[in-house]
Image (cartoon, helix red, strand yellow):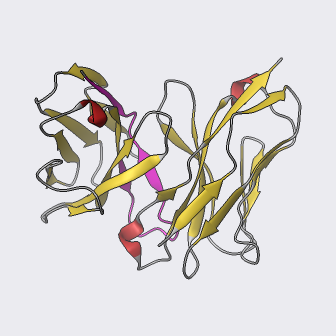
Amino acid sequence: SAVISQKPSRDICQRGTSLTIQCQVDSQVTMMFWYRQQPGQSLTLIATANQGSEATYESGFVIDKFPISRPNLTFSTLTVSNMSPEDSSIYLCSYNRGGSSYNEQFFGPGTRLTVL
Amino acid sequence: GDSVTQMEGPVTLSEEAFLTINCTYTATGYPSLFWYVQYPGEGLQLLLKATKADDKGSNKGFEATYRKETTSFHLEKGSVQVSDSAVYFCALSPSMGGGGNKLTFGTGTQLKVEL
């Protein structure tokens, strides 16, 4: 499987500011995904990011709050905008190898965000 | 919509005990089923998977069988070790061609193994 990394690994931010999280895969992948894991909870899909098209957002998530870029087949960014303490979570990116019969996803190490 | 239900934790076991973590799902068609593990301070790792009914996924001594009739995918291990302490997530992905390969996760079950 390809190596997937995220930057930053953690950050502490002030209310009202924005943070951009980067996700890098060391080979080309078709689909990338962004998830949120709130404290003590499971993972919730924010959006699916395909190269060359706008991201597809899940119910409850909007582009103005979580703008996503996918400029090429190895990279994506997620911005958490106008942050509030409720945005404190771990944000994870993942990719799908495509063409597999079992839709397996590989996850990055996550970005732990704390909003004060 | 699709959903995954896991037994609540934390589950505390003594080393070498038998482990079962229950997982049931609701989905249309024939989803793929997964168990992911999150060790303390680390990211999510795929533990095992099954893609069709009666398939058994296995890895590192863990096993889970895809039971279509009971819509279940329970995780088992015959003898747990302290190093198995982690949070375990059951997940599903829709049938091929549907849902854009999205994963739906259960709430996670924390396992603590003591000496």
Residue B18 shown left or right of residue A81 in the figure: right
Range shown magenta: A94-115
How many marks can you see?
0
The residue that appears at 35% across and 34% down in the rendered structure is A89
Residue toward you, A13 or A32: A13
Q: Nearer the viewer, residue A91 or A23?
A: A91
Residue drawn at (87%, 40%) of the image: B18
Q: Quadrant of residue A9?
A: top left
Residue A18 as seen in the image, left or right of residue A106: left
Q: Which image quadrant is residue B38 in?
A: top right
Any magenta on residue A98? yes
Residue under the image location 15 percent in, 47 percent down:
A65
Question: Does residue A1 appear anywhere in the picture?
Answer: no
Residue B49 in sight: yes
Q: Position of residue A30 (x, y in %)?
A: 29, 61
Question: In the figure, B66 relative to A23: above or below?
Answer: below
Q: Name the spot of residue A72 as percent of width and height, x first.
A: 15, 53
* B67 or A28: nearer the viewer: B67
Which residue sits at x=39%, y=59%? A97
| Rendering coords of residue B52 (x, y %) | 65, 74
Does the magenta portion include A44?
Answer: no
In the rendered image, the residue lying farthest to the top is B115
Taking the image as shown, residue B82 lies to the left or right of residue B109, namely right
Residue B61 is left or right of residue A102, and the answer is right
Whether residue B8 is situated above or below residue A46 in the rendered picture: above
List x then y, in percent, for residue A110. Answer: 37, 34
* In front of the other: B3 or B103: B3
Above or below residue A105? Residue A109 is above
